[in-house]
Every structure is written in C-alpha cells, then in structure tokens.
Image (spheres, rainbow, N blue to C red):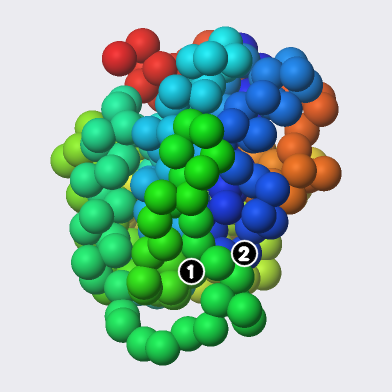
C-alpha cells in the first residue's frame, strides 16, 4: 500500500492554486499511489470533492486535516470518514480568531467541487493557531474515531518537539510523521521520542512539483490501516 498521507490542496492558503482535488487525485494515481490524504490546515472542506475524485481515479482517500493547535503545533488528524473530518474541521474553524487579512498576501482559500470549480472561500485565515490546545485537539480527534499524528516532528517550527522541547507523557501518540525519515535513528538515540515509536513520512506537498513519484509503503501494523477498512 504505497502512500502519501500529507498533501495540501488549494484550500490551504500556502498551497499553489493548481493543487485542486481533481488534479491531486489524478497525478497521484498516475504516479503510482495507492492511498493519499489531503490534509489542509484547520479544515476538511475539500474532502468531499477529493473523495469523488479519488474514487474516479482508483486511489484510496484517507480523510484528514492538519490542525494548528493553540500552542502552534501541527497535528495531523486522520479519520474513518469524510463526515468525521468535516466535524473536526468545523470545531477548529469555530475556534479560529477573526481578523482582517489580505488574500493577495496570504493566498486565497478555495473550496472546490469535483469539477475544480470554486464553490466557497472561508473568511477566517486557516493557517492561524486554533483555540484548541494539543490535548483538546487530540481528544476531539479520538472522540470522532480518528488517529492523531504529530506532524514533521523533525522540523524547527510548528512541530511538537520544536515547541515543547520534549516528547510529552500525555497525550500519547501511536506514531509520528518525519519530514526526513533518515532522522529517525538520531531522534530515538537522543531520547527525544519513545524507543519503539513508528514513523510515517509525508511529502507535505504544497505544489504539483512536490507530489511524490516514489512512495513509501504503509507498515502492516500501522494503526491507520484500521481507518482504511471502515
């Protein structure tokens, strides 16, 4: 099961406008992916279109979003259904602050249909920190049947380790994402992560050129496999 479980669509203001649900699904299928996750910042509103596009192209969609918690920690949240992801996204959006921002500077936020037509543009800036803490975000994700995964923990910003400086005892996480999988041994040897912690690696693609053409394979015992069976 070849995967890329961290892709941003044009709903994320930091992503290119070409990152539409249909284009992502089509290119990932062409490149050889079996399962993908479109994980936009604090919102899941492009997942209904993505689900239809993935079905048309023969790629499995794992519903997801990337929460930016109150501490400014990026947390990938994976769900068994698009509906659960939308509920999570609604809660995060409700907690976002309201302020004037310029789409010409930050980038537009496009909600698309399966035909790549713009159907809405959220008024709040999705990349800001939500009002839910790491603990609250993790709890809500699990209440909705999801699996929370700290994102790109080896990066110097917006990661669990860069913000907290250590791996927390609570909440517990079943796995984590690395931007660079070669850093796993060093993080484990330094005691920054639990010794048996499994890892994912995602492209975190914000543009078409960053989409994978070679894919890692999802481990047989990965807890995300249970979501794909639902």
Q: 105 and 4: which one is in front?
A: 105
Residue in the picture at 52% in, 24% down: 53
- Give percent across and percent down for residue 220: 53, 12
How crowded pointer 1 is (Cα within 10 Å; few <14, some 14-19, many 20+) is rated as some
Instruction: Give the CA separation, mark 2 to mark 1.
Output: 8 Å
Horizontally, residue 182 falls left or right of residue 71, namely right
Is 66 rendered above or below residue 202?
A: below
The answer to whether mark 2 and mark 1 are in CB contact below 8 A is yes
Residue named by callout 2: 14
Q: Quadrant of the C terminus?
A: top left
- Give percent across and percent down for residue 91: 22, 58
- Give percent across and percent down for residue 105: 63, 81
Q: Quadrant of residue 31?
A: top right
- Is residue 154 visible in this depiction of the protein? no
Query: Mark 2 or 1 closer to N-term?
Result: 2
Outermost residue to the left: 143
Horizontally, residue 100 falls left or right of residue 31, namely left
Q: 112 and 25: which one is in front?
A: 112
- Give percent across and percent down for residue 12: 53, 58
Is 67 rendered above or below residue 156?
A: above
Which disc, if any, is residue 213?
none
Residue in the picture at 36% in, 87% down: 99
Q: Quadrant of the N terminus?
A: top right
């Amino acid at each position: 099961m070849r995967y890329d479980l961290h892709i941003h669509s044009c709903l994320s203001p930091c992503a290119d406008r070409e990152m539409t649900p249909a284009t992502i699904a089509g290119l990932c299928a062409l490149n050889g992916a079996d399962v993908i996750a479109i994980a936009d910042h604090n919102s899941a509103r492009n997942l209904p279109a993505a689900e239809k596009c993935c079905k048309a192209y023969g790629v499995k969609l794992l519903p997801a979003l990337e929460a930016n918690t109150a501490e400014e920690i990026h947390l990938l949240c994976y769900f068994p259904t698009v509906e659960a992801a939308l509920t999570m996204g609604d809660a995060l959006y409700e907690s976002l602050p309201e302020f004037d921002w310029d789409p010409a500077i930050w980038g537009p936020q496009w909600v698309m249909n399966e035909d790549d037509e713009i159907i809405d543009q959220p008024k709040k800036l999705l990349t800001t920190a939500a009002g839910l803490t790491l603990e609250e975000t993790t709890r809500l994700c699990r209440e909705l049947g999801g699996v929370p995964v700290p994102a790109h923990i080896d990066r110097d910003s917006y990661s669990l380790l860069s913000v907290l400086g250590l791996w927390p005892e609570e909440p517990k996480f079943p796995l984590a994402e690395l931007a660079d999988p070669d850093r796993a041994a060093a993080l484990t040897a330094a005691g920054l992560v639990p010794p048996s912690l499994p890892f994912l690696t995602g492209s975190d693609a914000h543009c078409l050129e960053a989409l994978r053409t070679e894919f890692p394979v999802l481990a047989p015992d990965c807890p995300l496999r249970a979501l794909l069976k639902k």
